Image (cartoon, helix red, strand yellow):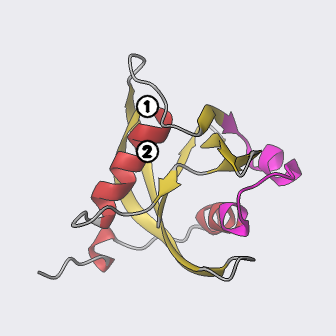
């Protein structure tokens, strides 16, 4: 999976989404589609889930996480900037709304979609910064 870390003026752009009839908070994130690059996937997922154009800048972390359901997830977190909001677009199915929250506000939440949300924010705040060239598509 991919996730976008978007930080502007002390706040992070997150989404509130419905998962199994529960509302949870997550970064704009999702799965790669067939034949889609990692950077193209994070650009697409951010647009679909927030209606913002996203410009990837660097990788802040790559995480392996074992979900309670037994599934293993590999998540690439990409930091970038939002450039333009498309107010004429609709949020993706399952996305209730977007929210801008501070680190302190996020830490108080009890409905984060996974521990990856806070871990990736902590790593961003620590200054983790890896070049996008770390990702290579081999054809």
Q: Secondary structure at mark 2?
A: helix
Residue under label 1, please give it. Answer: 51
- Left or right placement of residue 52 versus residue 28 in this view: left
The foreground one among 111 and 109 is 111
Q: Secondary structure at mark 1?
A: loop
| Residue 69 position (above or below residue 115) | below
Residue under label 2, please give it. Answer: 46
Q: Is residue 127 visible?
A: yes
User: For residue 119, which numbered disc appears in the image?
Assistant: none
Q: Residue at 36%, 63% (x, y): give it.
A: 32
| Residue 99 position (above or below residue 108) | above
User: In the rendering, at what x and y percent does residue 122 appear?
Assistant: 69, 65
In the orientation shown, which residue stands out farthest toward the left?
Answer: 139
User: In the rendering, at what x and y percent does residue 103 appear?
Assistant: 75, 49
Look at the image and give the residue range highlighted in magenta: 100-118
In the orientation shown, which residue stands out farthest toward the front?
Answer: 20
The foreground one among 81 and 111 is 111
Residue 57 in magenta stretch: no
| Residue 94 position (above or below residue 79) | above
Residue 106 in magenta stretch: yes
Q: Residue at 20%, 77% (x, y): give it.
A: 137
Q: CA distance from mark 1 to mark 2?
A: 7 Å
User: In the rendering, at what x and y percent does residue 5 appear?
Assistant: 53, 54
- Which image quadrant: the C terminus? bottom left
Q: Residue at 66%, 41% (x, y): give it.
A: 10
Location of residue 88 by image quarter? top left
- Left or right placement of residue 88 versus residue 13 in this view: left
């Amino acid at each position: 999976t991919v996730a976008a870390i978007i930080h502007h003026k002390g706040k992070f752009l997150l989404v509130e989404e419905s998962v199994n009839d529960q509302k949870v908070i997550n970064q704009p994130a999702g799965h790669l589609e067939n034949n889609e690059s990692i950077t193209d996937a994070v650009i697409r997922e951010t647009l679909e889930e927030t209606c913002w154009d996203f410009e990837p800048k660097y990788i802040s972390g790559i995480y392996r996480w074992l979900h309670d359901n037994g599934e293993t997830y590999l998540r690439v977190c990409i930091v970038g900037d939002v450039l333009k909001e498309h107010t004429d677009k609709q949020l993706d199915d399952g996305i209730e709304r977007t929210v801008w929250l501070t680190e302190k506000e996020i830490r108080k939440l009890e409905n984060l979609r996974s521990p990856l949300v806070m871990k990736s924010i902590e790593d961003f705040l620590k200054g983790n910064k890896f070049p996008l060239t770390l990702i290579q598509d081999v054809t």
